[in-house]
Amino acid sequence: MTRVKATSRRRGRRHAQPETSDEALQPAEDWAAIEVGATVEVTLAAGHSYTGHIDSKTHDSGLVWVIDSAGQGRQMYGNRDGVRLRPH
């Protein structure tokens, strides 16, 4: 009788590598003073900006959800994404 070697289900999988790009090294924006409901100007890393209001945020202010004033929907941003929020 010949034994057949069992194949691993994990073969070929790679572990996630930590980010080493410049984007991962962005300094954190301090959004603690921005309150839920506040109107803000959102400036994206690419330079595009729009006005919206803060719909929700995490307790540590690391993530915020902004609803676009022009009706383009709700977007989540992290304080290390290169996005700037300024009171409007």
Image (tube, rainbow, N blue to C red):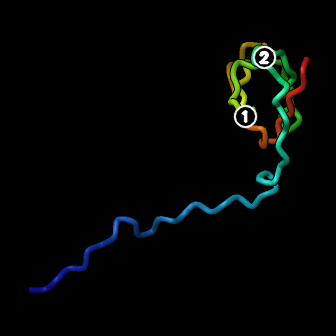
| Of residues 69 and 29, the one drawn nearer to the viewer in this rendering | 29
* Above or below: residue 80 compared with residue 56: below
Give the percent coordinates (x, y) of residue 78.
Answer: 73, 37
Residue 60 image label: 1
Q: Where is residue 1 shown, x and y percent of the image?
A: 8, 86
Furthest-bottom residue in this view: 1
- Residue 62 image point, x, y percent: 73, 36
Amino acid beneath label 1 = Asp
SS at mark 2? strand
Q: Position of residue 70 (x, y in %)?
A: 77, 13
Total numbered labels placed on residues in the image: 2
- Front tag of 2 and 1: 1
| Residue at 82% across, 31% down | 31
Of 23 and 86, which appears nearest the observer? 86
- Which residue does the numbered mark 2 point to in the structure image? 53
Residue that appears at 68% across and 30% down:
58
Q: N-terminal of the two: label 2 or label 1?
A: 2
Q: Secondary structure at mark 1?
A: loop
From the viewer's perspective, tell me whether residue 41 is left or right of residue 18: right
The quadrant of the picture occupied by the C terminus is top right
